Amino acid sequence: MQFIRDRFPELRGAGTRLRDDCASLARGEHFWIFARRDDLDVYWPQDNGEIHVRPDLTWTASIFLGVEDRPADIHRDSELVFGTTDTLDNRDLAAYCTNCLSTGFFPGRHLPRSFNELAHISIRRTQH
């Protein structure tokens, strides 16, 4: 899968195994997407927070794969990891996202302790 647009490509979810996993979200589980560039060991939460799964099991999220014209981000492979967290880690992640948005500083972080991976995909960021 390749994203053609440089900034905030939109990812829509439906179908396949991930849809089935979203259908079985237990009370207290929260759906998140994280991105990690192939040469880094930290992740960044996507869409500025928890991903809302609609009753029809679809969702939409904005994905950010680096700065638009930054050479280090172009033509790089990244991994998108989809999964759930418990309520405690969800609160911590929500506070982290709020702090990042208010300060404009977005340090990466490791996946939360309770993270349960549902799926992952590898993608390459391109420039048009």
Image: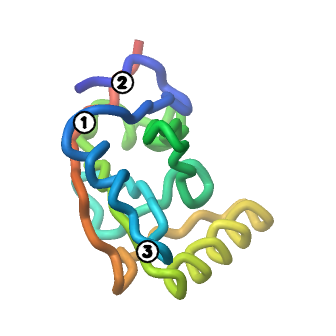
Question: Label 3 belongs to which residue?
Answer: 109
The CA span between labels 3 and 1 is 20 Å
For badge 3, the amino acid type reads Arg
Instruction: Find residue 9 and report its horizontal and vertical position in percent.
Output: 49, 28
The residue that mark 2 highlights is 3
Residue 126 vs residue 120: left or right? Answer: right
Q: Are marks 3 and 1 in contact (CB under 8 Å)?
A: no
Q: What is the x, y in percent for residue 26?
A: 40, 70
Image coloring type: rainbow
Q: CA distance from mark 3 to mark 2?
A: 24 Å
Identity of the residue drawn at 54% across and 29% down? 7
Q: Position of residue 57 (x, y in %)?
A: 43, 41
- State the residue in front, 106 or 81: 81
Front-lying residue, 102 or 94:
94
Residue type pointed to by label 1? Ile
Picture quarter with the N terminus = top left
Res. 118 image quadrant: bottom left
Task: Classify the position of the C terminus by image quarter.
Answer: top left
Measuring from the top left, give residue 51's x and y in whole percent: 53, 52
Q: Amino acid at mark 2?
A: Phe
* Residue at 23% in and 41% down: 77
Which residue has dot 1 on it?
A: 123
Name the residue at the top extreme: 128
At horizontal 36% and vertical 24% (from top left) the residue drawn is: 3
Pointer 2 local density, CA inside 10 Å: few below 14, some 14–19, many at least 20? some
Find numbered disc 2 in the image and state the secondary structure of the residue it sits on.
strand
Mark 1 touches mark 2? (CB < 8 Å): yes
Dot placed on the residue nearer the N-terminal end, 1 or 2 = 2
> Disc 3 vs disc 2: Cβ atoms closer than 8 Å?
no
The secondary element bearing badge 1 is classed as strand
Q: What's the distance in space between the residues labelled 1 and 2, CA to CA?
A: 8 Å
